[in-house]
Image (cartoon, coloured by chain):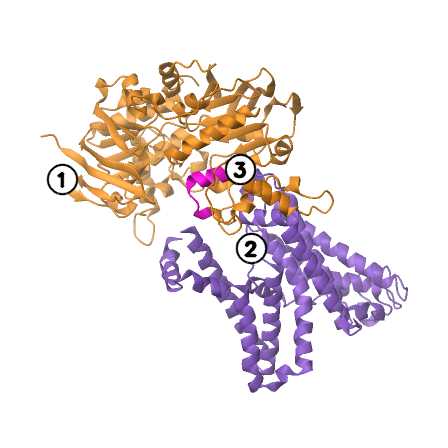
Amino acid sequence: MASIEKPLNKLIKLVHVDSFLRMFLSQYFILILSILIFLVMWPVNPNIASPRALMNILENLLPLFIIAIGQMYVLIIGDGGIDLSQPSIIGMTSVIGAIFLTNSVNELKLGSSVLWGTLLGPDGGPFANSPLATPVAILIMIIIGVLIGSINGFCIAKFKMPPFMVTLVTKELFLYIAIWLTQSFNITGLPDSFIEIGRGSIWTIPYVLIIAAVMGVIASIILKRTVLGKWLYATGINSRTARVSGVPTNRVIIFAYAFSGFCCAVGSIIYSGRLLQGSPTLCRAMLLDIIGATVIGGTSMFGGRGRVSGVLIGCLFFALMGTVLNLLRLSPFIINMVKGLFILTVALLDVIRLRRSES
Amino acid sequence: MANIALEINDISKSFFGVYVITDISFKLEKGNILGLIGENGAGKSTLVNIVGGIHQVDKGNMKLFGKLYAPKTPRDALEKHISFVHQELNLFPNLSIADNIFIEKYPGGSVIKHSEMKKRTSEMLKWVDLDISPSTLIEKLSPGQRQLVEIVKCMRINPDIIIFDEPTTSLASKETERLFKLIKKLKSEGKTIIYISHILTDIKKITDDLVVLMDGKITDSGKTDDFSINRMIKSMLGRDIMGRKYPDKINKSDEEVVLKVENLSEPGIIRNINFELHKGEILGLFGLMGSGRTELTRVLFGIDPYKEGNIYIHGKKENKLSPEKSIKNKIGFVTENRNEEGLLLEGNVAENISLVSLPNYSSKILKFINTNKQKESINEIIERLKIKIGSTEKQLVRSLSGGNQQKIVIAKWLMNKPSIFFIDEPTRGIDVGVKYELYCILNKLADSGASILVVSSEIEELVGICDRILIMSKGEISSEFKNREFDNEMILTAAFKQKSML
């Protein structure tokens, strides 16, 4: 570590004034940055203010927000907490939900699946065309999401395995289980009632917005006003102190990962609905956005810090950046590089903040 | 004039404005074994760390064989042939003996010459009478063997001065004897040695000269032969042992037994522990490092497991202990390491103080916190304990003084109104004024009916505040002193003698 300290300390001295640093890390900085980007882009490409672009930003923002809340909970509990398996939970729940929802399956594509003949047939899945399809599918998706999350949490809490390792393994594992189940094809034929959730609205308010708002409020209330919330933060700041002080750290850790799985399931409902298909690779490349939004929103990678409002702003930033860079007709590779650079910068600032507090 | 190996001139060192050692001067003759004794916190470690290049002095200087010596890093000290055998051995358990010895400087430059390394290691092992292969992994060695490897590691740089810091804490008596033989052999080869130890009988056995530190100053020095154990103790603690202020004890403890421990054992850690804690009693537990006293409290609180024995809390036998259960049983535990296990350093005062008692302030079902009631209790306890802070929400605990930090840990546990209270090293790292406040807090707690178990390595602190004192050594309770009719000399002698068994 000694060799890293010198340049890092030099950098810390550069970012000298404490208020300067606080400004950079304040979530409001990101919000202001977002507004600035918007204003700067406006004369360059007026399309950014068009209802379609704004709607685009909102549509990208909301489901990302739902999933990022889950990642935030996992980051808050610290000790290297991270959930790399989120995209795979989304894919897995998408596939399993679709199996129960679908009312017509293409035999040419899914005929070789292990489920053909048992759960799937040319006329769809077990609840094909049934009014129960959507509620049952939603329930099962949520159960699967929570289950996979709990498996993650259990391995990390009880077996003390590193979160990076555990969630990386479940990520790969469930991705390939989902692909295997569908023979890598998507499942179409989803009922309208399900699709409505992702795409529809009530009194011009999109269902997504309602779901995101409810989840955001609940997640925030848990963190700010309940014992569980205090336990989550305490475990993140110092799990040893928390343990001695009577916090059931194992249960808290399992809850955080299970909650992450829950958020993925809800996000999956929306994304699958929008795609009109159940897809095993749904959101496969979204990890950068999820973690980026969470970290940029002020959640520390080291645990103990994180706010729902911060995550919201982080998601806004990413959704905005995605749209802006798209309108600039930059290639997706460059877009991801730019996103990556932002995350790296914020992560570095996070480390600097931590080092300063240690000295 | 005898050859002076090391000269220490008026050295003073402070941390965060607090002077840890002041005006230390002495001369160390070549080929002599100098004993350095003093209580915890007296400044011994700081002093030798300065010699070893870990700290830099604020005032004063050092001379090594007549030349000015001012190491900036441990490497500088090594280059000047000064070796350090630390209390906590710096060995890599997953590497072999040879690797550990040569890891600083492998023979051969970029490509390691393994055969040469093995040969040299074997020679060095022979010198200490250790008959094992150089490729043996450290994790397979006993503590005594590991220490010999550590010494061999020191020998690699052909040191002139070797510093031993509490070398015998994890050694059995046979291994201690072997160590002493080795030290005498080193002396006969012209090496100069500084030997730090709590075990005064060992100091008498092996050292030629003696320096006694107390509160950062030298109180006594001279030839070891001129020192009796009594003189050593008096110099370590000051002429007037009860001179430090302690609150008057007016409480009398009940007969009611709140905690009963029967035949408690955890192999390698504690053995056959039997004792009772009475209501309203302040029971002291004294022991040096490695005696098992901290481990015992951790087992009692439920953090660490135990193999055999019975624990009765308020008369009821408890089987599966855990921190959650202990807290429900109204037991509190201030650990010896508040930074690692007592505080949320990155959290604010309110978060820290409220942590244990959170469930008490929440509704049953959804566990919403009643912030108003909680805030009231927090403010009340801050006032009661005289914790000096600004805003409870904004003040981060890491920026507080040691004394205030310790008070916050205590406050955290008091919020749960404990009836049994374990406190380990209550005044470690705290200045004198606050120490008295803490003793008063403990006293008041016992007055109100709580039963307290105080673990400490400062015997006079225990003498000052306890009703009874148990002394632990090598995992067992070796003696008990009752009813505040403490014969100070007797206790202190019992405390500082090595129990000669095992």
Q: Supply the letter of whichever chain is purple.
A: A
Asked if residue B119 is positioned above or below residue B176 in the image, the reply reads below
Front position in the image: A15 or A203: A203
The image's mark for residue B66 is 1
Q: Amino acid at mark 3?
A: Ala
The image's mark for residue A282 is none
In space, the residues marked 1 and 2 are separated at their CA atoms by 55 Å
Q: Supply the letter of whichever chain is orange.
A: B
Which image quarter holds the N terminus of chain B? top left
Q: Is residue B165 magenta?
A: no
Q: Position of residue A248 (x, y in %)?
A: 63, 41
- Determine the secondary structure under disc 1: loop
- Determine the secondary structure under disc 2: loop
- Determine the secondary structure under disc 3: helix
Image quadrant assignment for residue A269: bottom right
Is the C-beta separation of discs 2 and 3 under 8 Å? no
Q: Give the magenta-colored segment's residue range.
A: B398-411
Which image quarter holds the C terminus of chain B? top left
Q: Is residue B405 magenta?
A: yes
- Name which of mark 3 and mark 1 comes first in the sequence: 1
Is the C-beta separation of discs 3 and 1 under 8 Å? no
The structure residue drawn at horizontal position 54% and vertical position 19%, both measured from the top left corner, is B272
